[in-house]
Image (cartoon, rainbow, N blue to C red):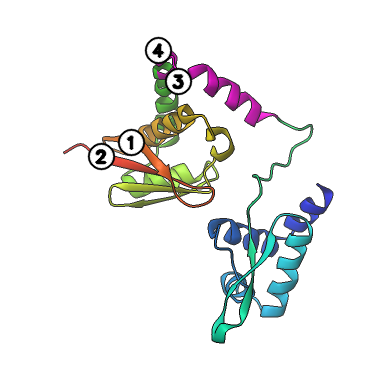
Amino acid sequence: MDLALRAISDPTRRAIFDHAQRHSPMGVTVEQAAAAARIHRSVAFDHLEMLADAGLLSRGERAGRRGRPARTYVHSGPALQLSYPARQHLLLATVLASAFLGRPGELRAARAAARKAGLELGSRARGASSAVRALSSLGGRYLLKGEELHARNCIFREACTGNPAVCTVHAAIIEGALDAAGVTASVSPTGADGAGGCRYLVEVAR
């Protein structure tokens, strides 16, 4: 953990790590990381190697120019959580989600509470784009394309595995934020969106 903490303590290295997360599972090349961080290729290589040595990225290869393989760096591990003492948010979320399964009444109550949280989150937002920015303050990366909302680097990724109730709760938070911003819509989960992401259908009331 000390090595991982040192690895992301540098702002440029942390930005490269975030960039690699967003491009999982394809990963990023040294050139792509250098372009994203606006630094020299050799500097980007050093940063990527330190992230890989810390176990935050995995080294790989893919077809490059002229048939030569290009080295890639892929984020494929669990979410990095730094806290002292260790917080067991994932365990709590998993236990609560398991309690909702097969109990419609409890799930409806959880959805109502989540929607209320979304309303508070989007209370200062005006319009869909503003609501998406408010949602991004939770730590994820949200992108609205037509009637599809992509939640990249999903904030509930680990908890939702095997627990669809978590996705329902997440949808309610999104729905509440949109409603607060003046967009009345029904939001429902539609599945995974690459590594660490998910998709939601946003049906706006006409």
Element type at marker 3?
helix
Q: Name the residue under label 3.
A: 110
**Between 39 and 47, the one nearer to me in the picture:** 47
Q: Is 133 included in the stretch rendered in magenta?
A: no
Residue range of the region highlighted in magenta in the rendering: 88-107
Crowd band around label 4 with a 10 angstrom C-alpha radius: few (<14), some (14–19), many (20+): few
Mark 2 or mark 3: which comes first in sequence? 3
Crowd band around label 3 with a 10 angstrom C-alpha radius: few (<14), some (14–19), many (20+): many
CA separation in Å, label 2 and label 3: 21 Å
Q: How far across and down, in percent of the image, does residue 191 sit? A: 41, 42
Element type at marker 4?
helix
Q: Name the residue under label 4.
A: 105
Q: Mark 1 points at which residue?
A: 187
Q: Is residue 165 left or right of residue 3?
A: left
Which kind of residue does numbered mark 1 sit on? Answer: Val
Mark 3 or mark 4: which comes first in sequence? 4
Q: How far across and down, in percent of the image, does residue 145 sit? A: 33, 53
Count of numbered marks: 4
Which kind of residue does numbered mark 4 sit on? Answer: Gly
| Disc 4 and disc 2 in contact, CB within 8 angstroms | no
Q: Is residue 1 left or right of residue 202?
A: right
